[in-house]
Amino acid sequence: MTTLDRYISTLFLRNLAFTLLALVSLYALIEFIEKVDDFIENQAALINYLLFPIYNLPLMISNTLPMAVLLGAFATIGDLSRTNQLTAVKHSSPDLQPLADAPRNPGNRVHQERANHQKTQK
């Protein structure tokens, strides 16, 4: 992995984390406001109010992750363009493959590490 790939992947993961956090928070707030009437109607304990968003967190992440990846990629390209780094990348190589590979690189690294870990377990 080249330095450029690592830089773009880090920038993408940071944008993805912020975007995912914002979308999951918004999703949790809206879901909680919709369900609060049911909690009051069924006289639920206070602990149920607090545990509801935590138990639904995997569902919230799986529902918002595709949109977060798309928005994170747009934010990454926007950050690079705003600081004129996109122009430098465009002129330093004949193709924009490093930019296209950036969202896939973290996933590929996780997959490779998992495959290596499974090989060492056998």
Image (cartoon, helix red, strand yellow):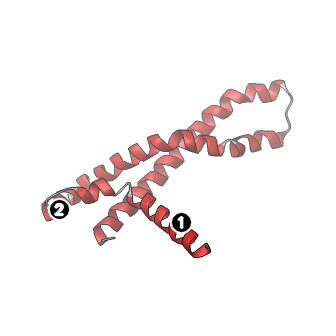
Residue at position x 62%, y 41% in the image: 59
Graded by Cα atoms within 10 Å as few (under 14), some (14 to 19) or many (20 or more), the crowding at tag 2 reads few
**Viewed as shown, does residue 76 lie left or right of 50?**
left
Residue at position x 38%, y 60% in the image: 105
**Viewed as shown, does residue 49 lie left or right of 68?**
right
- Could you say which disc has been placed on residue 88 in the image? 2
User: Which residue is identified by label 1?
Assistant: 114
Q: Position of residue 109 (x, y in %)?
A: 44, 65
Position of residue 32 relative to residue 100, above or below, is above
Residue type pointed to by label 1: Arg
- Quadrant of residue 92 within the rendered picture: bottom left
Please state which of residues 15 and 5 is positioned toward the viewer in this rendering.
5
- Could you say which disc has been placed on residue 16 in the image? none
Position of residue 17 relative to residue 56, above or below, is below
Q: Quadrant of the C terminus?
A: bottom right
Q: Are marks 1 and 2 in contact (CB under 8 Å)?
A: no
Q: Position of residue 111 (x, y in %)?
A: 48, 61
Please state which of residues 18 and 89 is positioned toward the viewer in this rendering.
89
Mark 1 or mark 2: whose residue is earlier in sequence? 2
* SS category of the residue bearing label 1: helix
Q: Position of residue 20 (x, y in %)?
A: 50, 47
- Residue most toward the front? 122
Residue 83 showing in the rendered view? no
Position of residue 14 relative to residue 49, above or below, is below
**Viewed as shown, does residue 13 lie left or right of 49?**
left
Residue type pointed to by label 2: Ala
Position of residue 90 relative to residue 120, above or below, is above
Q: Position of residue 63 (x, y in %)?
A: 55, 38
Graded by Cα atoms within 10 Å as few (under 14), some (14 to 19) or many (20 or more), the crowding at tag 1 reads few
